[in-house]
Image (cartoon, helix red, strand yellow):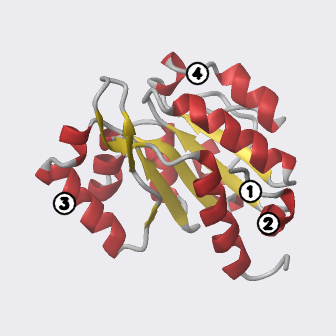
Amino acid sequence: MTTPESDLGPVSGREIVVGVTGGIAAYKTAHLVSRLAGAGAGTTVVMTEAAKRFVAPLVFQTLSGRPVHADLFARSEVWPAGHIALADRAEIVVVAPATANILAKLAHGIADDLLSTFLLAADAPLIVAPAMNVRMWQHPAVAANCEVLRSRGVRFVGPVEGRLACGTVAQGRMAEPEEILETLADLARDLPGKQ
């Protein structure tokens, strides 16, 4: 079921940063970015190097109408540095898919690439859409990291049960873009300004 454009009104005019990590579910994020941009959200994509192995940055650049950011050390003519400028601009941040790796980095304050550095600098509300094999999702370390993140106010969408990349049907599949969009719209309604 598709979320009607009218239900996405609260995201219009909002600055939303979409983090994309290296999981097969990254292909779904293209639809998420397309719908956000179509609803009038200023949509900026930040990718990890691993994410670029699943979906080309050009896809997100075309759908968002904005440059895609992936290199922490990219030369910039602007100051503050790229990750700080992105953090200053972001009103909502969503990471989809959120791999076990990015969840661990965020829970433990590790900043070793552009996305993880940006996430530590941003103080905007954060939504994560986990996606990974069911055994990874159920691992005690991942569960502990998720608990830490929830205690810090991070909102989780999924994962859901479904067919995983390995062929197993189990929990670990990234939530569908429509469910993520609903959470984004609900969150945007609660933010000050631009009502």
Q: Please give the label number shown on residue 3.
A: 1
Label 1 – label 3 distance at C-alpha: 33 Å
- For mark 4, give the secondary structure: loop
* Tag 4 near tag 2, CB within 8 Å: no
**182 and 195: which one is in front?**
182
Residue at image position (49%, 31%) is 48
- For mark 3, give the secondary structure: helix
* Tag 2 near tag 1, CB within 8 Å: yes
Label 2 – label 3 distance at C-alpha: 34 Å
Q: How crowded is mark 4: few (under 14 residues within 10 Å), some or many (20 or more)?
A: many
Compared across the picture, whether 96 is left or right of 186 comes to: left
Q: How crowded is mark 3: few (under 14 residues within 10 Å), some or many (20 or more)?
A: few
Q: What residue type is labelled 3?
A: Ala
Q: What residue type is labelled 1?
A: Thr
- For mark 1, give the secondary structure: loop
Which residue matches tag 2?
7
Answer with mark 1 or mark 3, whichever residue precedes in sequence: 1
Q: Is residue 191 visible?
A: no
Front disc: 1 or 3: 1
**152 and 12: which one is in front?**
12
Above or below, 99 relative to 4:
above
Answer with mark 2 or mark 3, whichever residue precedes in sequence: 2
Which residue matches tag 3?
144
Residue at image position (51%, 60%) is 127
Q: Which amino acid does label 4 sit on?
A: Val
Which residue matches tag 4?
55
Compared across the picture, whether 169 is left or right of 88 comes to: left
Q: Please give the label number shown on residue 123.
A: none
Front disc: 4 or 2: 2
